Amino acid sequence: MLSYRHAYHAGNHADVLKHLTLLAILQQLRIKDKPFVGIDSHSGNGFYNLGSEPAKKTGEAAQGFLRLWQQREKFRGTDLVGDYLNLVAGFNPVDTGASIGNYPGSPAIMQSQLREDDQLILMELHSTEIDHLRDNFKRDSRISMHHRDGFEGAVALTPPMPRRGLLLMDPAYENKADYQQAIKTVQAVHRRWPTGIIALWYPMLGQSRDLSGLVKQKLGNVADSVSIELTVAPQSDEFGMHGSGMLILNPPWQLAERVNAALKKVGPLLQV
């Protein structure tokens, strides 16, 4: 089933958590001169218009990233949050007010941090999204794109060369099988690439549907790991995503401290 389209959810509170964490990891990788490889297993199309009809239909961006954007002057000069907002501003040189015409997804954020010798591997299975992805990144020789299942591709394409790098995995979790598949994939990738940084996003849902505890239970002891979570509302009985988390294997030094400090600043703006 491939009904998920990130255009409806781009810029939501989960994106804020995911992108802050991703940017912090990439900044750490850039400290050393040695090249690295970034891998994005579920890429989407890379850029989104937060003023589009899909974005307006759900209103998730208006309750998520756009709340930060509207108060961006407040965060000017701050560490990670300021870097994130400056990055987005770089894709939007013309001020369009409260909306964003070029909101970077994870592929664009990863591309923005590449140096000359770094590489990026993007995967997307959805037939429409892969076409948009190719159009958006076809001019960058450092980037390779694959029309394939991200779970399968993550295992098949690791370990990369060079072996220094990051795998980002943020599946749609359209059904419960995705949780087990994500866990198995992370375990398999870690066996093949024990030194790689693996960052898995997971949703936090209503009590009857929430499997975030399973993710942490199965992967929390696989390697040196940390879980960073953002909640924006109390947990309901059944429906709704009240928060999400990032489970990172082999996290860079002080990653959790840096991201949690950023979440402490932006979290109050994202509360429902």
Image (cartoon, rainbow, N blue to C red):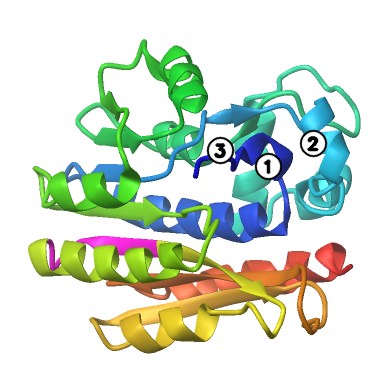
In front here: 95 or 38?
38
Q: Are marks 3 and 1 in contact (CB under 8 Å)?
A: yes
Residue 9 drawn above or below residue 144: below
Residue at figure coordinates x 43%, y 79% from the top left: 215
196 falls in the magenta region: yes
Residue 116 drawn above or below residue 69: above
In front here: 220 or 264?
220
Residue 117 x %, y %: 19, 30
Residue at figure coordinates x 56%, y 52% from the top left: 19
- Real-space Cα separation, disc 3 to disc 2, in angstroms: 14 Å
Left or right of 18? Residue 98 is right
168 falls in the magenta region: no
Q: Are marks 3 and 2 in contact (CB under 8 Å)?
A: no
Residue 27 x %, y %: 41, 51
Amino acid carrying mark 2 in the image: Ala
N-terminal-most mark, 1 or 2: 1
In the picture of the structure, the residue carrying the numbered disc 3 is 105
**How many circles with numbers are drawn on the protein?**
3
Residue 51 x %, y %: 83, 28
| Mark 2 surroundings within 10 Å by alpha-carbon count, few (fewer than 14), some (14 through 19), many (20 or more) | many
N-terminal-most mark, 3 or 2: 2
| Mark 1 surroundings within 10 Å by alpha-carbon count, few (fewer than 14), some (14 through 19), many (20 or more) | many
Left or right of 63? Residue 264 is left
Q: Are marks 1 and 2 in contact (CB under 8 Å)?
A: yes
Residue at figure coordinates x 9%, y 42% from the top left: 161
In the picture of the structure, the residue carrying the numbered disc 2 is 55
Residue 100: name its quadrant: top right
Residue at figure coordinates x 72%, y 58% from the top left: 13
Residue 260 drawn above or below residue 66: below
Left or right of 2? Residue 272 is right
In the picture of the structure, the residue carrying the numbered disc 1 is 10
